[in-house]
Amino acid sequence: MDRVLIFDTTLRDGEQSPGISLDVGEKLEIAEQLSRLGVDVIEAGFPIASDGDFEAVEAIAKSVRGPVIAGLSRTGFKDVDRAWEAIRHAERNRIHVFIATSEIHMRKKLRMTPDQVKAEAGAGVARARSYTDDVEFSPEDGFRSDPDFMCEVCQVAVDNGAATLNIPDTVGFGLPEDYGKLIAYVFDTVTGDYVVSTHCHDDLGLAVANSLAGVTNGARQVECAINGLGERAGNAALEEVVMAIKTRSDYFAGVDTGIRTEELARTSRMVSRLTGYPVQFNKAIVGRNAFAHEAGIHQHGVLEDRETYEIIDAGLVGQEAAQIVLGKHSGRHAFSDSLDKLGLHLQGDALNQAFVRFKELADRKVQINEADLEAIVAAELGLGIVHKFAMVSLDLEGGTQRTPHAYVTLTDGAEKIEADGEGNGMIDAAIAAIAAATGVTGELTEFHVSSVTRGGDALGDVVLQLDANGVRAGGRGVATDVVEASARAYLAAVNKVVRLRERPEVRERAVGP
């Protein structure tokens, strides 16, 4: 296979992201994980930037084995010497020298002529080459540079010992076709023995696409960062570059990386935790929802065969495949499958009634978890039994200065029944309204309320016992609102009372929830 080297710049360009400041211990932890991940080069930092950066690069160079440890340097000798001092203890080391070549950078930032830039590039690379055989050169803002002048500077770098030419799209201005052509132009123009590298920023959301265009045009090193961290909109995301090459091996024929892909998700989580930069839920490859499915048609598909909607084996990147998320878009197939996994095997009318209740709750609770499912089924025990009364709506009004009032609409299968009631509180008012609508009154002998799950959208679980003139029946209700849960529990008990009155032979039995 033709190897594409993965140059990770999470600890250098990634740490330059606003608000990120890693200490030596944190950088070491990430560097060790990058080594386990199998990156080829770790750009550990910019040693001259600060004493802290120098100490971190030096610590990584002394302790991390496997990858090449690189330090960034401008062309000035003081920078180069400082970089070497930081990386010299590494098992394998590299000095990464850069200078800008675009007209705007030379004129506005460097205040140097093109000839001065060429001289600086040659001198800086030569100084680095005096320390190590592995020198990389970058013409900063290369994509916006005059291609001929940029190649002249690159030629000077190669002539002075650079083994890698990195062509940066520093401000994320490139488009894949144009960036790919620039990489090909470098090969056609600059003579010598060198590897071409890409370094693309994501200002237009094209960093990964541009990097891959570079690979198809001969680049054999990609500079990238975990989770796409980096200046402004960030760098090409390492996990996306690697998995694009691996997944589309038909397109990138004969090309591969040495990344241990099963470490990708773990590395992503570590970097997120230590930098404080969260990973967006729908982030490709490593996002929480990257392999999650809520839409019913998608859930049905992946439950039959993962490949219907997942192009990557989630296990290859350290994720869980076919994650079924139950919500308002979920279908009956996923609902039934989730119940089966909990050991709750429902069919026919029982499944239909539970599914209707699930959909009602999912409209108000963003995501339904296992505890919620268990509560829904428990509240609907007796599934398959036709209930005389069903709740259509419940409206409440009241407060500290007004008597609580409830308005309920029920159906008995044939028509709607509306009633209202007052009480000492909202629950009392709701019960009074249901009693008026059904004609079933009695005494609550037990009442228990608990939270099924945590959080502001937790389901309230109410269990009660109703004694209606000697006929005792239990009811259970589940809802995101405790008053509604209580009303549903009371209505469930009323339905049991009605059934018991229609069956005199079991009237003396107490029916539990």
Image (cartoon, grey):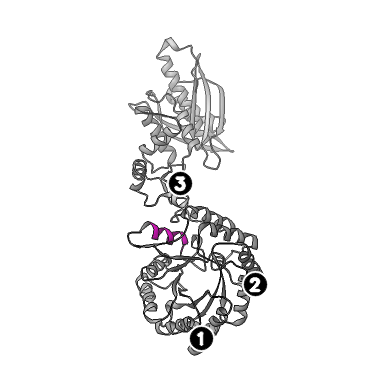
Q: For the residue carrying disc 3, how many other residues have a C-alpha within 10 Å: few (<14), some (14-19), or many (20+)?
A: some
Question: Of helix, strand and loop, which one carries label 1?
Answer: helix
Circles 2 and 1: CB distance less than 8 Å?
no
Q: For the residue carrying disc 1, how many other residues have a C-alpha within 10 Å: few (<14), some (14-19), or many (20+)?
A: many
342, 328: nearer the viewer: 342
Q: Quadrant location of residue 284?
A: bottom left
Label 3 to label 2: alpha-carbon separation: 41 Å
Residue at mark 3 = 320
Looking at marks 2 and 1 on the same chain, the residue that comes earlier in the sequence is marked by: 2
Label 2 to label 1: alpha-carbon separation: 25 Å
Instruction: Tell me which amino acid carries mark 2.
Output: Ser
Q: Note whether residue 439 is visible.
A: no
Relative to 33, residue 179 above or below: below
Instruction: Tell me which amino acid carries mark 3.
Output: Glu
Q: Residue at x 41, y 34 (%)?
A: 357
User: Is 177 displayed left or right of 139 in the figure?
Assistant: left
Relative to 85, residue 489 above or below: above
At which x and y percent is residue 459?
51, 37
Q: Which residues are magenta?
A: 236-246
Q: Main secondary structure of the magenta part?
A: helix
Is residue 242 inside the magenta stretch? yes
Circles 1 and 3: CB distance less than 8 Å?
no
Relative to 94, residue 400 above or below: above
Label 1 to label 3: alpha-carbon separation: 51 Å
Question: Of helix, strand and loop, which one carries label 2?
Answer: loop
Residue at mark 2 = 50
Q: For the residue carrying disc 2, how many other residues have a C-alpha within 10 Å: few (<14), some (14-19), or many (20+)?
A: few
User: Which residue in the rendered view is the most extreme toward the top?
Assistant: 505
Q: Residue at x 61, y 70 (%)?
A: 87
Residue at mark 1 = 117
